[in-house]
Image (cartoon, rainbow, N blue to C red):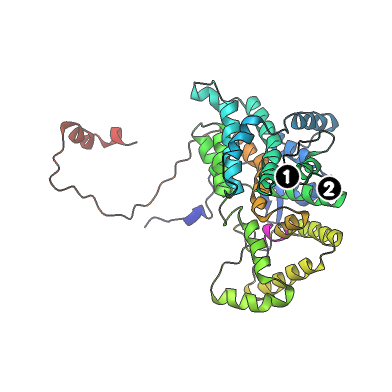
C-alpha cells in the first residue's frame, strides 16, 4: 500500500538556506540568527537584507537599501486605479493580490519571451526590493479607502515601519508603537516551507516570474488555516468580550468542536518560539494605550485553553490584539502579513531559481478502474497512443 503523507506532513522536499526551526532550542532561525534576537536589535530593513543576501548589512549596505526602498514607496497611478476598481466590500487580500498582479504586469511589460520574464538573479533581487517597498502603500491605502479617508503620501524621512504607520493613519506614531510594529514585521517575515512559501516555490519551479509566484503565495496566505488566522483571533476576542466570560465561551466552543484559531502549529510542539517576543510587544501596547482588559482576556483564554487541551499559542494569537490596539482594521491583519512575508517569499523564489527542479509530486489514484464510453470507437491516433503510452504521457 502506498504510504500517503497527507498535507506533505513530514516530507522533506528540498534544501534551503533561508530559515529553519532549531529543534534543540525551539528557535526560528533566519540565515542562522534566532528571530527573537533580530526582532530585539534590528530594523526590518536589515532583516530583509539578511533574507535576500545571507548576511546582515553593514552601515553602507543598509543605507543603500533604505535609499532604494524610500524611492519606490509611492502608490503609482496604475496600481491605485486597479484598487479603486474593486468594491470596498472586497477582502483586502484581494486588493493586495490585484495590486501585485498590476505591478508585475508593468514590470514585465514588453518582454515577449517567457524565459526573459523569469529574470536574472540580480534583476529579481531588484524586483524583490521594489515590490517590498510598494506593498505598505497598497495596504495602507486599502484601509483608508474603506474608511472613506484620502490617500496619505509616503515620507522619506521615516524608516520602513514608521512610514507604514504614517501612510495608514496620517500621523507619526509613538516610538513604542513603531517598535512593536517593527518587531511584528520581523517575526512574520519568514518561516521555511509553509503553505504560501511552498506555493511560491512551486510556481517558481515552472520558470514563471517572481510576481506570479508572489500572487500565488498571497492566495495561499489568505486562508484561515494560514495567514487569515490572525483575523480569526480578533473575531474570537470580540465574541468572548471579557476575561470573565472566557470559561463559559470555551465550554461551548469545545462542546461544538470548534477550531480555536491562534493555537497550535504544525512545526512547534513546545510552543511557537516567536510568541514571547510578540507578547512582550503586546504588553508594551497594553500599557501605552491603558488597556488592561485586553491583557486580561488574552491571559485568561491562553491559560484555560492550555490547561484543557495542552495546545499553546502561535504568533497569530498575540499579533491580532496588537494590531487592533495600533488601530488596524481586522481585515487589514493578513495584508500586514503579506507586507512582511514578501521578503521571505522572494528569498525562496530566488533560491528555487538558483537550483531549480520542477515540483511535480505523485498521487495515489482511488477512482474507478479504467472504463469506456458506450458506443465509442477509437480512431487511429487513439490506438497509436495506447500502443505507445510512454510518448503519450504528459
Q: Which of pointers 2 and 1 lies earlier in the amino acid sequence?
A: 1
> What is the quadrant of residue 53 in the picture?
top right
Q: Residue at x 74, y 50 (%)?
A: 184
Q: Position of residue 313 (x, y in %)?
A: 68, 63
Q: Which residue is drawn at 59% across and 58% down?
A: 266
Q: Which of marks 2 and 1 is in front?
A: 2
Give the residue at mark 2.
173
SS under mark 1:
loop
Location of residue 178 with respect to 310 vertically, above or below: above
What secondary structure prevails in the magenta region?
loop
- Give the magenta-colored segment's residue range: 311-318
Could you classify mark 1 by the number of other residues whose Cα lies within 10 Å: few (under 14), some (14-19), or many (20 or more)? Answer: some
Count up the numbered dots: 2
Q: Along the line of sight, which residue is nearer the eye, 19 or 152?
A: 152
For the residues labelled 2 and 1, the Cα–Cα distance comes to: 32 Å
Q: Where is residue 136 in the image (x, y as percent from the top left)?
A: 71, 40
Could you classify mark 2 by the number of other residues whose Cα lies within 10 Å: few (under 14), some (14-19), or many (20 or more)? Answer: some
In the picture, measured across the screen, residue 175 lies left or right of residue 251, that is right
Give the residue at mark 1.
32
Q: Position of residue 295 (x, y in %)?
A: 78, 67
**Looking at the figure, which quarter contains the C terminus?**
top left
Location of residue 177 with respect to 249 vertically, above or below: above
**Looking at the figure, which quarter contains the N terminus?**
bottom left
Q: Position of residue 110 (x, y in %)?
A: 54, 20
SS under mark 2:
loop
**Whether residue 385 can be seen here:** yes
Amino acid at each position: 500500500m502506498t504510504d500517503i503523507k497527507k498535507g506533505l506532513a513530514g516530507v522533506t522536499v528540498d534544501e534551503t538556506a533561508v530559515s529553519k526551526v532549531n529543534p534543540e532550542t525551539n528557535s526560528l532561525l533566519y540565515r542562522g540568527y534566532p528571530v527573537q534576537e533580530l526582532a530585539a536589535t534590528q530594523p526590518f530593513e536589515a532583516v530583509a537584507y539578511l533574507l535576500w543576501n545571507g548576511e546582515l548589512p553593514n552601515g553602507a549596505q543598509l543605507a543603500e537599501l533604505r535609499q532604494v526602498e524610500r524611492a519606490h514607496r509611492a502608490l503609482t497611478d496604475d496600481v491605485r486605479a486597479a484598487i479603486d476598481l474593486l468594491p470596498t466590500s472586497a477582502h483586502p487580500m484581494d486588493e493586495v493580490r490585484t495590486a501585485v498582479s498590476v505591478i508585475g504586469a508593468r514590470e514585465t511589460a514588453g518582454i515577449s519571451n517567457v524565459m526573459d520574464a523569469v529574470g536574472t538573479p540580480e534583476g529579481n533581487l531588484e524586483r524583490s526590493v521594489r515590490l517590498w517597498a510598494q506593498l505598505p502603500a497598497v495596504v495602507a491605502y486599502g484601509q483608508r479607502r474603506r474608511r472613506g479617508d484620502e490617500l496619505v503620501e509616503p515620507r522619506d524621512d521615516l524608516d520602513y515601519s514608521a512610514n507604514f504607520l504614517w501612510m495608514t493613519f496620517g500621523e507619526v506614531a509613538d516610538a513604542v508603537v513603531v517598535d512593536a510594529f517593527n518587531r511584528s514585521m520581523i517575526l512574520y517575515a519568514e518561516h521555511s516551507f509553509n503553505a504560501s512559501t511552498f506555493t511560491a516555490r512551486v510556481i517558481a519551479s515552472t520558470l514563471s516570474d517572481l510576481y506570479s509566484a508572489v500572487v500565488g503565495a498571497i492566495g495561499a496566505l489568505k486562508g484561515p488555516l494560514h495567514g487569515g488566522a490572525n483575523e480569526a483571533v480578533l473575531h474570537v476576542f470580540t465574541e468572548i468580550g471579557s476575561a470573565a466570560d472566557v470559561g463559559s465561551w470555551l465550554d461551548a466552543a469545545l462542546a461544538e468542536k470548534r477550531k480555536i484559531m491562534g493555537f497550535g502549529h504544525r512545526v512547534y510542539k513546545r510552543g511557537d518560539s516567536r510568541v514571547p517576543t510578540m507578547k512582550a510587544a503586546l504588553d508594551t501596547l497594553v500599557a501605552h494605550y491603558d488597556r488592561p482588559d485586553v491583557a486580561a482576556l488574552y491571559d485568561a483564554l491562553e491559560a484555560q485553553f492550555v490547561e484543557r487541551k495542552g495546545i499553546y499559542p502561535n504568533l497569530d494569537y498575540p499579533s491580532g490584539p496588537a494590531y487592533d490596539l495600533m488601530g488596524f482594521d481586522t481585515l487589514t491583519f493578513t495584508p500586514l502579513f503579506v507586507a512582511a512575508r514578501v521578503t521571505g517569499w522572494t528569498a525562496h523564489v530566488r533560491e528555487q531559481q538558483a537550483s531549480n527542479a520542477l515540483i511535480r509530486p505523485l498521487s495515489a489514484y482511488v477512482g474507478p478502474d479504467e472504463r469506456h464510453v458506450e458506443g465509442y470507437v477509437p480512431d487511429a491516433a487513439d490506438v497509436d497512443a495506447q500502443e505507445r503510452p510512454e510518448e503519450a504521457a504528459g
